[in-house]
Image (cartoon, rainbow, N blue to C red):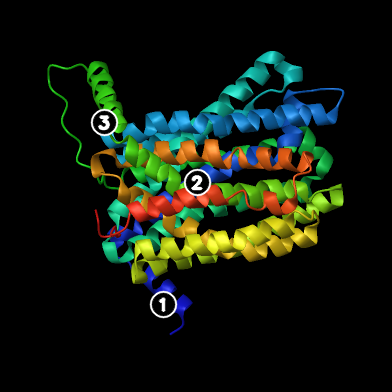
Amino acid sequence: MSTWQRIINDAITVPATQARTALPLLGNLLEWYDFAIYGYLAQALGDAFFPSESNSAALLSSFAVFAVGFLMRPIGSLVLGPLADLYGRRRMLLLSLTLMGGSSLLIGLLPTRLQWGETATVLLVLLRMVQGFSVGGEYTGSIAFTAELTSADRRGLMCSFTSSGAQIGIALASLVVAGCSALLGEQALMEWGWRLPFLMGSSLLVLPVWMQHRLPETLEIPARPETASQARHWLHALGTQLQTLVEHRRLLVQVMALVCTSNVVFYLLYVFLVTHSSQSPADGVAARTITSAVQLFGIGITTLAGWLVDRYGLIRINGVGTAAMVATSLPALAIGLQGSPVTLLIALSLATPALMVILGSQGLLGVTIAPLEQRCGVFSIAYSTSVALCGGTAPLIATWMVDQNVPYGTIALYPLPFAAATCWALWRARGRSSHDF
């Protein structure tokens, strides 16, 4: 029996209780579809809500609102992470999915600036902020929920499915926009067709209703004292939880260090190099096509990584994967910096396999490091902060280095300091395994 046959066999023979982890995967997929669809429709949204004599100015305004979603992620993690530790993983996931689905529905129905004036623009910004807030806790909460719901011998595989949901959601967003463009035509898509992908994403609202009666709670929730009001009890409990998180600040730093290299490499490869390789409209289309194709190929490697974790251990796969990621990403960046679709294809093909191994195994290690009572809080806050500070700034810094004529060989070394921090975090986590729950 081949390796892939064994992986498929492991996945389809899980007990009914573990099969419920498909629901967090579906939620993660739809959550990231809704979050990513804005980026693919930035030009249409710019014309509808940021009208300007310059198309580039409208696009820049739209992308600025896109970035607001990322800035809201740490705030969302600061609230939703402790909330999941206080009131349960399931409740947090249901809240997150409801916020995201509702935001997509309202964006799809929102009148344009020509109809409502500046009110429409303000509402779009607020809805995008709600989307970013929602994502701040959903991914990490899904990983924690899946890990707690699954037996130790299949925990790596099932968590890798949940991780791959985000990648599938982003790819699905790209395919839906491309399909709408082909069916409606580019002009219709820009005028009104942009609403359809958002309205399709609002189907996410059905999922919380379905999940509520099919997912068990994995965390024992302490009873509220009879003498305490709901609001006072919640504020007191949240304050206590945040104070405890401060006491776990070393764990927060460790998890941030653990995930920082993969975030930097991902955003350099899939954001910076894609833009750097798009020197003309034709090159831009080719670069986006290459990116989507390679990322879809990488989903299988993400699943393989989870299966390998169950066979060979959590630390071993993360350690080998990190070493391979650093070894391949540095030459890949040097090649991709040449700035053409061909060099982009070579760079992504070289670096993506090791990166996907990390994306398929790192989430489980992140929740394993944290204690049960602060698991979602530690992982959510650390992960979102690392994305904002390390991953989100990487394309900006790399672009500035190119503008300053920094040698490409020097720019390619950018991930090295982060790799040192990740190696430290792995060393601190030695001895941990997927059985440590």
SS for tag 3? helix
Residue topped by disc 1: 6
User: Which comes before the other along the chain, label 1 or label 2?
Assistant: 1
Residue 68 appears in view: yes
Horizontal and vertical percent position of residue 423: 43, 54
Crowding at label 3, few (<14), some or many (≥20) Cα neighbours within 10 Å?
A: some
Q: Nearer the viewer, residue 430 or 237?
A: 430
Taking 187 as reference, is 42 left or right?
Answer: left
Crowding at label 2, few (<14), some or many (≥20) Cα neighbours within 10 Å?
A: many
SS for tag 2? helix
**Residue in the picture at 76% in, 35% down:** 43
Taking 26 as reference, is 116 left or right?
Answer: right
Residue topped by disc 3: 244
Which quadrant: the N terminus? bottom left
Three-letter code, disc 2: Cys
Classify 80 as above or below 290.
above
Residue topped by disc 2: 260
